[in-house]
Image: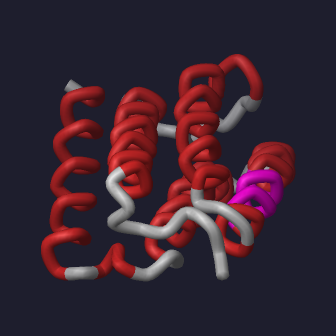
Amino acid sequence: MAYLAGIIIATLVSSFATLVGLDKKRSFYPTVLVVIASYYGLFAVMTGSTLAVLSEAAVMVGFFGVTVLGFKRNLWFVVAALVTHGLFDFLHDHLIANPGVPHWWPMFCLAYDVVAACYLAYLLRRSRLIANAR
């Protein structure tokens, strides 16, 4: 059910963004990536685990760096980072001990990340969004 929810919600959010024009600017999907990358940090803060906060913060910094690179250079980096975050979701429990993460979250987030990456790739391939910064 978590996978299905991630697929449906990512599809609805992405379609809505296109329908109302939110994703016409290069900043939309990089902003989505920043938000996605911050949730594990939020879960860590909620538990009060310093080790989890520091571990999640280190990962967040990496994704934030790729977000900036994608926004400033080429949005294909954002596509790759979204897919990579999906892989991170799949492996999260094996990499970082964060007791605040709901058991369904990695499955939901993996599905959301992959659908968002595919949608952004579709926009870039159809030239509805320019990949390279000018």
The answer to whether 81 appears left or right of 24 in the picture is right
Q: How many marks are shown on the rendered structure?
A: 0
Q: Is residue 109 visible?
A: yes
Specify the quadrant that holds the C terminus: bottom right
Residue beneath the point at 73% across and 68% down = 73
Q: Quadrant of residue 102?
A: top left
In the rendered view, tell whether residue 8 sits above or below residue 22: above
Was residue 64 drawn as part of the magenta stretch in this picture?
yes
Residue beneath the point at 33% across and 66% down = 128
In the rendered view, tell whether residue 68 sits above or below residue 25: above
Q: Which residues are magenta?
A: 60-67
62 and 132: which one is in front? 132
Q: Quadrant of residue 5?
A: top left
Q: Is residue 43 visible?
A: no
Residue beneath the point at 61% across and 42% down = 80
Q: Quadrant of residue 107?
A: top left
Specify the quadrant that holds the N terminus: top left
Magenta span: predominant SS is: helix
Was residue 22 drawn as part of the magenta stretch in this picture?
no
In the rendered view, tell whether residue 86 sits above or below residue 117: above
